[in-house]
Amino acid sequence: MGLSPDNFHGLTLAVSSSIFIGASFIMKKKGLIKAGTKGIRAGSGGYTYLYEPLWWVGMISMIVGEIANFAAYAFAPAILVTPLGALSIIVSAVLAHFVLEEKLHVFGVLGCALCVVGSINIVLHAPQEKPIHSVKQVWQHATQPGFIVYTFLVLIVVAVLIFRYVPRYGHTHMVVYVGICSLMGSLTVMSVKAVGIALKLTFSEMNQFKYFETWVFVLVVTVCCVFQLNYLNKALDTFNTAIIAPVYYVMFTIFTILASVILFKVIYYMTGSHKVEHRL
């Protein structure tokens, strides 16, 4: 079954995004290592990496990747775009092996292969998204009880992780840092989806930035990205990059798909080459 034009554009942007983001993990890790020799490590609460040029090169690469990812969400559903992050795992794992000399063993290779197979399967059975004609439509979904409950649960769990578990287990259990990034990331993606749609419609001469809802989504994206960036740096500075990338990808994908299903109230059942859409 062929991809629709919008899904194809989203696919192309998502693949480009994965390459830039995968490479950014390595450059940021190198920058963090170098900065750690000059001051307090990021994993210990330091910010000396902000003065390290190599870290900024990685940051720019990540920004370029996120912009491409941002644009991808405007064309294709999150359930298609997010799983393609598996490609960033391959990029970061290969570069970590050669650049950082972090060895990827048999099970790591098998895990990466399974991620790619899963992503290809999702691409081949990508659902068609219902056209959205205004950011207000996304806002209506976001203010439904189901997504409000999900948002509050995410914020509560993140607060517990930050104030209770980070001080105790942050340096020994990577799931703490990665969990914070993944949970906040699921809210980021939903807001990015809304802002991406707003930009797409605005460029089509249907200005969406006259609505306050658009600016609320922009604010959510900004706040969530700051949280993710801070704790992702801590994770990269403390643990092996070849391990962080796949675990982050899996957790982020799970929570993003869950948030997408709750937000848009759509469950897709794929049987063979047919897709049936059920609205709850």
Image (tube, helix red, strand yellow):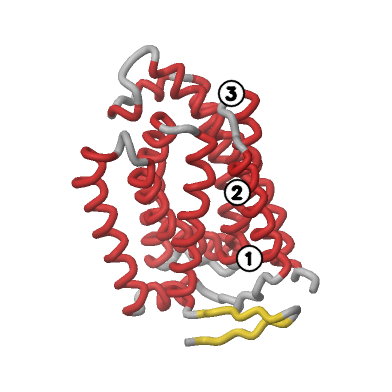
Kindly identify which numbered label has been placed on residue 99.
none
Nearer the N terminus, badge 1 or badge 2? 1
Nearer the N terminus, badge 3 or badge 1? 1
In the image, residue 13 above or below residue 244: below
Q: Residue furthest right?
A: 2
- Separation of disc 2 and disc 3 at Cα? 19 Å
Circle 3: is it few (<14), some (14-19), or many (20+) Cα within 10 Å? few
According to the picture, the residue beneath numbered tag 3 turns out to be 101
Kindly identify which numbered label has been placed on residue 111.
2
Q: Give the SS element for disc 1.
A: loop
Circle 2: is it few (<14), some (14-19), or many (20+) Cα within 10 Å? some
Q: Give the SS element for disc 3.
A: loop
Identified at 48% across, 47% down, the residue is 247
The image quadrant that residue 50 belongs to is: top left
Marks 3 & 1, CB-CB < 8 Å contact:
no
Identified at 52% across, 50% down, the residue is 249
Q: Give the SS element for disc 2.
A: helix
x and y percent of residue 128 in the render? Answer: 66, 75
Nearer the N terminus, badge 2 or badge 3? 3
Q: Residue furthest left?
A: 164
Circle 1: is it few (<14), some (14-19), or many (20+) Cα within 10 Å? many
Q: Name which residue type carries label 1.
A: Ala
According to the picture, the residue beneath numbered tag 1 turns out to be 76
| Nearer-the-camera pick, 57 or 24 | 24
